[in-house]
Image (cartoon, rainbow, N blue to C red):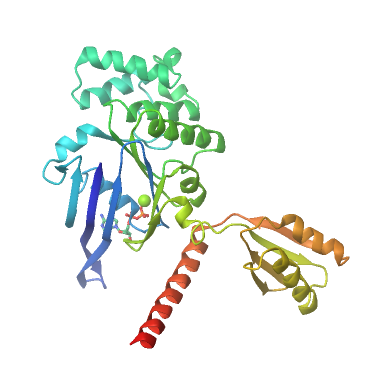
Amino acid sequence: MIEVKNLKKTYDVKRRDGLFKSHRETIEAVKDISMRIDAGQIVGLLGINGAGKTTTIKMLTTLIEPTSGTYSFDGMDAIVHPAEVKKQINMIAGGERMIYWRLSAYENLWYYGQLYGIDNSVLKQRIENLLKMVGLQDKANLPVETFSKGMKQRLQIARGLINDPKYIFLDEPTIGLDAVVTRELHDEIKSLAKVKEKGILLTSHYLSEVEELCDYIYLVNNGELIVEGTKKDLTDFVFLRNQYVFSTKGMDKNVYNGLKRHVRNVDNDAEILFENGKAMITSNVELSTILAGFAIQESLTIVELHKMEPSLEQAMIKLSKDMKKEAEREILYKSLVG
Ligand SMILES: Nc1ncnc2c1ncn2[C@@H]1O[C@H](COP(=O)(O)OP(=O)(O)O)[C@@H](O)[C@H]1O
Ligand SMILES: [Mg+2]
């Protein structure tokens, strides 16, 4: 088990104020993050750009040392023994980073295996097994530059497993990958955790990716943990379900009020907003046919009806509103009970 507590990372940077003036500034890339990763588990670190995900993953992979906080790696102090940790972890990159185009698949794996100081005969056997596992055994001796994107990604996976790591880290693994390669990588990540019992941490700013893959999720913002939990725990306030934009010809206050009643009949908790002549609806219920049904019943022509992809930005906004409400409730409660 990997466990970090109150991780913090600050950077001292020099900021220019003008031609001859500058001042020192402390940037808190990570302020306070605690998390754990167990074998066989896929843990997600979810956050918008600049939230502190990469900095956290760099501390966990011992590439950088935390400014403060503790890091226990299978019971060992990882900050004191980074070299021991490095032997038992690896990273899998998305796309084409960290592989050498001119070298063959075999040579790439051999090179990385040498870096880990793996015994030649063990390494030879391991490379053969890995190439078989990712379906590249017939392409082992071709230069990587002749590979398709999917093949390069599969080589990345083999590379990430060259030292038979216990824990695997992936920093925004699917950025820039097409849908097919993304799907393949997602399946591989799942099988590494569920079949091979690896502990996996992946960072992402895609709600859907984290939702699909992760057993446990940490949501970070501004270098701090906002919420954590299983997908089920977080569904109500992070994975905003079913958001719709709906408008009809001549949509006025009357139509809007009728729509509101119609939707509330199906889902009493639905949120409905009227903006720029359109209704924005958030609900836990699938409403596409309900909304279409409303238009038919009222003989209205639909101008727009679509379901939106939930975005992390929206989730964050909703979450901060919920947290504000919660804080207000707390204050009210305290003032009542004294
Ligand atoms: N080496 C560094 N020096 C100064 N600031 C940094 C450094 N690395 C990261 N930061 C800052 O820390 C914050 C978090 O960055 P990062 O961990 O890369 O976020 P994420 O991966 O979630 O996008 C950002 O504001 C970034 O500019
Ligand atoms: Mg990053």
Q: Is residue 102 above or below residue 197?
A: above
- Decide which of 309, 75 is in the foreground and name it: 75
- In the visual, does 134 lie left or right of 6? right
Q: Which residue in the rendered view is the most extreme toward the left? A: 80
Q: Quadrant of the C terminus?
A: bottom left
- Decide which of 22, 184 is in the foreground and name it: 184
> Image point 39% across, 14% down: which residue?
141
**Number of marks present in the image shown:** 0
- In the visual, does 85 lie left or right of 92? left
Q: Quadrant of the N terminus?
A: top left
Residue 38 placement (x, y as % from top left)? 30, 41
- Decide which of 131, 238 is in the foreground and name it: 238
Residue 133 placement (x, y as % from top left)? 41, 20
Is residue 104 visible to the viewer in this orientation of the structure?
no
Residue 279 placement (x, y as % from top left)? 70, 69
- Decide which of 157, 216 is in the foreground and name it: 216
Q: Which residue in the rendered view is the most extreme toward the right? A: 299
> Image point 33% across, 30% down: which residue?
160
> Image point 52% across, 63% down: which residue?
314
Q: Quadrant of residue 244?
A: bottom right
Q: Quadrant of residue 85?
A: top left
Q: Which residue in the rendered view is the most extreme toward the front? A: 337
Q: Is residue 154 above or below residue 45?
A: above
Is residue 161 visible to the viewer in this orientation of the structure?
yes
In terms of image quarters, where does ligand 1 lie?
bottom left
- In the visual, does 249 lie left or right of 220? right
Residue 260 placement (x, y as % from top left)? 72, 72
